[in-house]
Image (cartoon, rainbow, N blue to C red):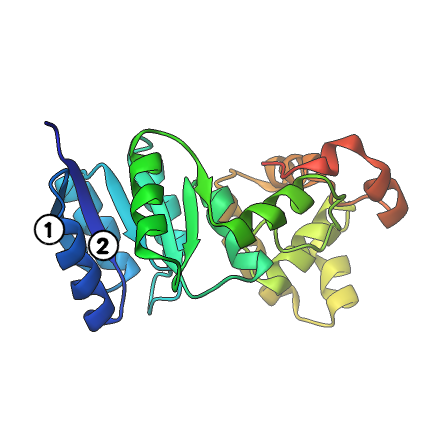
């Protein structure tokens, strides 16, 4: 029988080792590595190419969302199952947009965690009961242009700069609006281009407007495209 090869990424050593020992004791699971932070998880994923990574989100340095994004960018066949204390909307949807196939809150029954692991290993998507209801509500509501769910990889300030850029403002106009220096605007835009993987202002504007930025709030709320996240 083929065993599911798993990496556990969590910055709490007691929890990480305990979960790793539990998984490794299962007949159909092989624990191939442990990571104490996101950077280590990315490196181990590239080296070991596991079937599943059980990923915490709140880790030092590179957090779980960014680690998930990097891992799946390099190898989209790896399944990421988020197992975390965070159950607020923003981390849930940020993890989804990064490509996580499952999201379970720590404290769930062991059987629920194991079922989730088996599901994502098969290629299914799975969310705990509390998370599933939020996902359903999210997919049926319009998004605000300033909702961090749209571009979770951006900081609040970077999202503000992108919004003004999508409105057609120049760097100097953005600087005046936000009461910051033109150099700071350029730095924020450089970060935006890098995080969104766009080449220039035009691509950034196009990406932002497809997501609903740069529009009046009332027009955005009526847009059918805002019923679900847009890349």
Residue to which mark 2 is pinned:
8
Which residue sits at x=34%, y=59%? 56
Q: Position of residue 152 (x, y in %)?
A: 55, 53
Q: Quadrant of residue 213?
A: top right
Q: Residues within 10 Å of mark 1 (few under 14, many from 20)?
A: few
Q: Are marks 1 and 2 in contact (CB under 8 Å)?
A: no
Query: Quick one: 20 or 34, which is closer to the camera?
Result: 20
Please tell me whether residue 66 is drawn above or below residue 182 in the rendered image: above
Q: Image point 74% across, 50% down: which residue?
A: 145
Please give the label number shown on residue 25: 1
Q: Is residue 74 left or right of residue 198?
A: left
In the rendered structure, which disc, 1 or 2, sits on the residue that comes first in sequence? 2
Q: Residue furthest right?
A: 218
**Residue at the image position 62 percent from the left and 63 percent from the top:** 156
- Residue beneath the point at 60% across and 35% down: 203
- For the N terminus, the image quarter is top left
Q: Secondary structure at mark 2?
A: strand
């Amino acid at each position: 029988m083929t065993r599911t090869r798993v990496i556990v990424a969590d910055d709490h050593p007691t929890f990480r080792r305990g979960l790793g020992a539990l998984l490794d004791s299962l007949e159909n699971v092989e624990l191939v590595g442990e990571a104490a932070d996101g950077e280590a998880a990315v490196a181990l994923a590239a080296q070991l190419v596991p079937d599943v990574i059980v990923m915490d989100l709140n880790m030092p340095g590179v957090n779980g969302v960014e680690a998930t994004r990097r891992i799946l960018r390099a190898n989209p066949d790896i399944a990421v199952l988020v197992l975390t204390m965070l159950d607020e909307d923003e981390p849930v949807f940020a993890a989804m947009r990064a490509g996580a196939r499952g999201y379970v809150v720590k404290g769930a029954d062991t059987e629920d965690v194991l079922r989730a692991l088996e599901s994502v290993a098969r290629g299914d998507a799975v969310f705990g009961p509390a998370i599933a209801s939020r996902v359903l509500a999210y997919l049926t509501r319009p998004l605000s242009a300033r909702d961090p769910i749209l571009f979770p990889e951006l900081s609040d300030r970077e999202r503000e700069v992108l919004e003004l850029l999508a409105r057609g403002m120049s760097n100097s106009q953005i600087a005046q609006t936000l009461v910051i220096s033109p150099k700071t605007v350029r730095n924020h835009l450089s970060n935006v281009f890098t995080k969104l993987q766009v080449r220039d202002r035009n691509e950034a504007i196009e990406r932002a407007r497809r997501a609903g930025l740069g529009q009046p709030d009332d027009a955005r709320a009526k847009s059918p495209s805002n019923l679900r996240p847009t890349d």
